[in-house]
Image: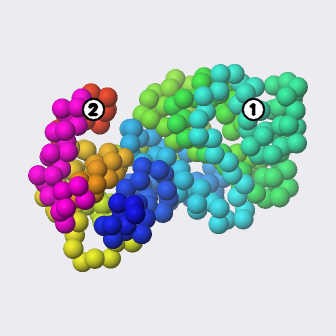
């Protein structure tokens, strides 16, 4: 039997996989999601969502996809790793992902691929009144050549709207790279930066994931003082909170305890420090929480 079933869960509550069902919508995440959906509906072109490692960008992208799946007027694709070395590789990937017939040919030149994409955007966007959306996660990996490809695609528009809706989710360095390309930077219609959670949001996130996983007992698994330690050690980064809570639940079983207390959290952190894990964890290298 899985550890989480022994503790009264139906599903694993603190998996680090980007499951949208377990995505806690903090005020900032909800603002980012709601504003992005508005931008897409208005067909305004480019939205950029920034955040440090572990702030929930990838899970936010999956939540966005879940929202778009229920909307028949959207045609969308997501690129998880945009590390394309050459311009034609990105163009070919876009043609294949959007199932453009010309995309099945490896012999097309860059101008031919651009033309095929332009025809597709006008056919779907104008002829069929669809909202064509491209979501790119880990967008800080985009090369300068790839950013230029996307800039050109954003030029395709009618008198009323952009034909391609582009959502870039990336680490903070993405913004400085975009700023170095003025004719790309000035196309940003919506920009949002995700920050770590405060204490109350950390508490709400833990409770949300516990309940979402099917836990129905009245006993709180995490004492408030334990959550204070979790927030202090993780600095409110959702990914790190998830990992620490997962370890804490396993510790409950190993020590045959009923609740996670601050002593348990500190013991886990001390073990990580002694094992040297904190040296490779950027979230633990930034000093105490403010």
Q: Which residues are magenta?
A: 253-277
Look at 51% across and 41% down and name the residue there: 169
Residue at left 78%, top 40%?
A: 96
CA–CA distance in space, label 2 to label 1: 40 Å
Considering only order in the chain, which callout, 1 or 2, is on the residue closer to the N terminus?
A: 1
Nearest to the observer: residue 82 or residue 121: 82
| Residue 282 seen by the camera | yes
Closer-to-camera residue (247/52): 247
- SS category of the residue bearing label 1: helix
Horizontal relation, residue 93 to residue 196: left or right: right
Q: Quadrant of the C terminus?
A: top left
Q: How far across and how far down the image is residue 192, in percent? A: 44, 46
Foreground residue, 286 or 3?
3
Residue at far front of view: 1
Quadrant that contains the N terminus: bottom left
Query: Is residue 153 toward the left or the right of residue 225 in the image?
Result: right
Mark 2, secondary structure of its residue = helix
Q: Residue at x 23, y 66 (%)?
A: 221
Residue 102 location, x and y as percent? 88, 37
Residue 91: give its label.
1
- Circle 2 residue: 277
| Number of callouts | 2
Q: Please, what is the dominant secondary structure of the magenta stretch?
A: helix
Is 227 displayed left or right of 114 in the figure? left
> What residue do we see at 37% from left, 67% from top?
5
Q: Is residue 265 magenta?
A: yes
Would you say 84 lies left or right of 119 here?
left
């Amino acid at each position: 039997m899985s550890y989480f079933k022994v503790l009264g869960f139906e599903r694993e509550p603190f998996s680090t996989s980007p499951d949208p069902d377990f995505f806690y919508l903090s005020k900032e995440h909800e603002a980012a999601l709601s504003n992005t959906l508005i931008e897409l509906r208005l067909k305004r072109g480019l939205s950029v969502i920034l955040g440090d490692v572990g702030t929930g960008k990838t899970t936010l992208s999956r939540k966005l996809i879940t929202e778009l799946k229920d909307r028949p007027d959207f045609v969308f694709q997501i690129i998880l790793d945009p590390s394309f070395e050459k311009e034609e590789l990105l163009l070919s990937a876009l043609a294949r992902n959007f199932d453009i017939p010309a995309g099945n040919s490896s012999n097309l030149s860059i101008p031919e691929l651009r033309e095929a994409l332009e025809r597709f955007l006008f056919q779907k966007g104008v002829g069929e009144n669809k909202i064509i959306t491209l979501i790119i996660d880990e967008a800080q990996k985009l090369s300068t050549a790839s950013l230029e490809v996307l800039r050109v695609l954003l030029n395709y528009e009618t008198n009323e709207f952009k034909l391609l809706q582009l959502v870039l989710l990336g680490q903070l360095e993405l913004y400085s790279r975009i700023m170095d390309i003025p004719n790309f930077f000035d196309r940003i219609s919506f920009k949002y930066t995700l920050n770590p959670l405060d204490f109350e949001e950390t508490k709400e996130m833990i409770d949300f994931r516990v309940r979402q996983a099917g836990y129905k007992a009245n006993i709180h698994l995490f004492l408030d003082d334990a959550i204070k330690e979790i927030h202090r050690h993780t600095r409110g980064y959702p990914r790190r909170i998830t990992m620490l809570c997962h370890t804490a639940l396993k510790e409950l079983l190993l020590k045959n305890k009923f609740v996670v207390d601050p002593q348990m959290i500190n013991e886990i952190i001390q073990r990580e420090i002694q094992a040297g894990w904190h040296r490779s964890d950027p979230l633990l290298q930034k000093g105490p929480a403010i």
